[in-house]
Structures are given as structure tokens and as C-alpha cells.
Image: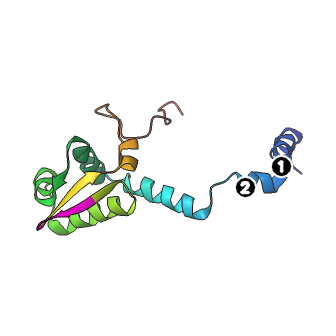
Amino acid sequence: MIPRPIQEEIDKCGGIPGLVGRVPNDQELEANAAVHSALSDVIRIKILWLLTIQPLCVCVIREIIGISDSKLSYHLSVLKKAGLIRGEQQGSWIIYSITGKGTTYTRTSEHQTYPSYYTLAD
């Protein structure tokens, strides 16, 4: 049996079907999970921050991050699949830049890398 106050709130939003209808679809949830997964690694967060400063080629990112080409390629791929960065071919170079979506996950604060709706008090 559902507690009365909970049932009343469920009824206000159209019952169980109304409640279910307010949850994002699986495709949206998967995209959201991909972003959170991409942001769960310090290297990827550092790459994202670097790209907030300016677009960069792989050789500069590699020098700053200090990891092998294969590891860097993996991290860039995760960020691209999450839609946080893009790579643009310019001659023989691929120049990486942050996307609008990526920008929403960074802030001007030097130590904060999560959307502003999250607070440490939660």
C-alpha cells in the first residue's frame, strides 16, 4: 500500500503513467550517463579544461597531459562520443575544441567542474 501523501502527489501528476511520462526516455538517459561517465576521469576533465582555453592539436594536449598516444586517443574518443568536444581536420592535423555542451560542464571557477545546479551541500 502506498502512503497517502505519496499517492496524492502521484495522482496530481496523472498517476503512475503520468509519473513515468516525466522520466526522460532511455536514449536521453544513456546520453546523460555517457556525459557523466566521460566526466568521471581526471584526465578527461583536464582535457576539457584545456579546450575551454583554446582549441588544441593532439601534440599539445599530449605534452601537457603526459600520456601515450593510445591513451590520449581513448580519452578524446570518450569525450567526443559524449558530445563534449569535437575534432576538426585541418590539413594533416586534427584540432580539438570544446562544444557548447562541453562548456556547460565547465565553469569559470578554477576548482569546479560540474554544472551549477549541483551543490556540495546536497
Q: Position of residue 76 (x, y in %)?
A: 27, 61
Colouring: rainbow
Residue found at the far front of this picture: 91
Q: Residue at x 51, y 30 (%)?
A: 121
Amino acid type indicated by mark 2:
Gly
Q: Quadrant of residue 81?
A: bottom left
Residue 21 magenta: no
Q: Is residue 82 visible?
A: yes
Q: Position of residue 1 (x, y in %)?
A: 89, 51
116 vs 43, left or right, is right
Amino acid type indicated by mark 1:
Gly
Q: Is residue 105 visible?
A: no
Q: Residues within 10 Å of mark 1 (few under 14, many from 20)?
A: few
Residue ID for mark 2: 21
**In whole angstroms, how far apart are the C-alphas of marks 1 and 2?**
9 Å
Which residue is more in the foreground, 109 or 95?
95
> Helix, strand, or loop for circle 2?
helix
| Residues at marks 1 and 2 touching, judged by CB atoms closer than 8 Å | yes
Residue ID for mark 1: 14
> Helix, strand, or loop for circle 1?
loop
Q: Residue at x 13, y 50 (%)?
A: 64
Give, as a single range, the part of the protein colored magenta.
87-92
Residue 72, relative to residue 64: is it above or below?
below
Residue 103, relative to residue 112: is it above or below?
below
Q: Residues within 10 Å of mark 2 (few under 14, many from 20)?
A: few
Q: Position of residue 8 (x, y in %)?
A: 87, 41
Q: Residue at x 80, y 45 (%)?
A: 13
Q: Quadrant of residue 115?
A: top left
Q: Position of residue 68 (x, y in %)?
A: 15, 64
